[in-house]
Amino acid sequence: MALTPETLPRHELAGLPVTVVGSTDPGRVGTGGTVVRETMRTLVVRTDSGVVQVPKRGTEFEFTLPTDEAAEGAKPSGTAVELPSETAGSAGQSGGGEAAAYVTVDGDVLLARPARRTEQEVDSTWH
């Protein structure tokens, strides 16, 4: 299954650029970097100032997908194929002027063990 804005919550998140765009803790908004690890309840993000553990519950994340991996024609709610949100840091910007899809995901959707989350809502009847 290709990594698209629609299928992002069912994919491995490690290695993706991410920015916190909403949180119950206002101090976390704007935190951005690369996901280095994921647990059941947190994302571990490498930022310019070190590694930060961000809880999934109560947090809105904006992931950056390169257009070659993102569906250019399909833009569900919360995505754009132009510029990142104003709160996005350097991790939310693609290098070299390349276009990218910016996908906003509610952290509550990601609450699960990573291996189990990627198995959920599979389009096939086979498990």
Image (tube, helix red, strand yellow):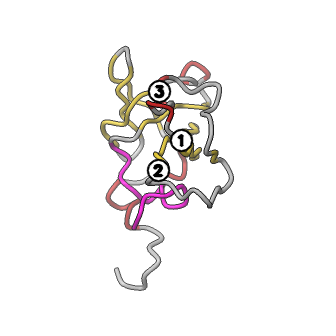
Please tell me which residue is depicted at 43% across the width and 36% down the height of the picture.
17
Rendered location of residue 59, percent (x, y): 56, 37
Q: Which of 36 and 28 is in front in this view?
A: 36
| Left or right position of 40 against 73 | left
Rendered location of residue 51, percent (x, y): 33, 23
- Badges 1 and 2: C-beta atoms under 8 Å apart? no
Q: Is 125 part of what is drawn in magenta? A: no
Mark 1 → mark 2, Cα distance in angstroms: 29 Å
The mark found on residue 99 in the picture is 1
Q: What element carries label 3?
A: strand
- On screen, residue 23 above or below 4: above
Q: Quadrant of residue 96?
A: top left
Rendered location of residue 63, percent (x, y): 50, 41
**Amino acid type assigned to the residue bearing label 2 in the image:** Leu
Looking at the image, the residue that sits furthest to the top is 49
Magenta span: chief secondary structure: loop
Looking at the image, the residue that sits furthest to the right is 77
Which mark lies nearer to you, 3 or 2?
3
Q: Which contiguous range is marked in magenta?
A: 1-14
- Badges 3 and 2: C-beta atoms under 8 Å apart? no
Specify which label sits upstream in the sequence, 1 or 3.
3
| Left or right position of 53 against 6 | left
Specify which label sits upstream in the sequence, 3 or 2.
3
**Amino acid type assigned to the residue bearing label 1 in the image:** Ala
Q: Quadrant of the N terminus?
A: bottom left
**Amino acid type assigned to the residue bearing label 3 in the image:** Gly
Q: Is 11 part of what is drawn in magenta? A: yes
- On screen, residue 40 above or below 26: below
Please tell me which residue is depicted at 50% across the width and 54% down the height of the picture.
70
Q: Counting other residues with Cα less than 10 Å from the Cα at mark 3, is it few (<14), some (14-19), or many (20 or more)?
A: many
The mark found on residue 32 in the picture is 3
Mark 2 sits on what residue?
111
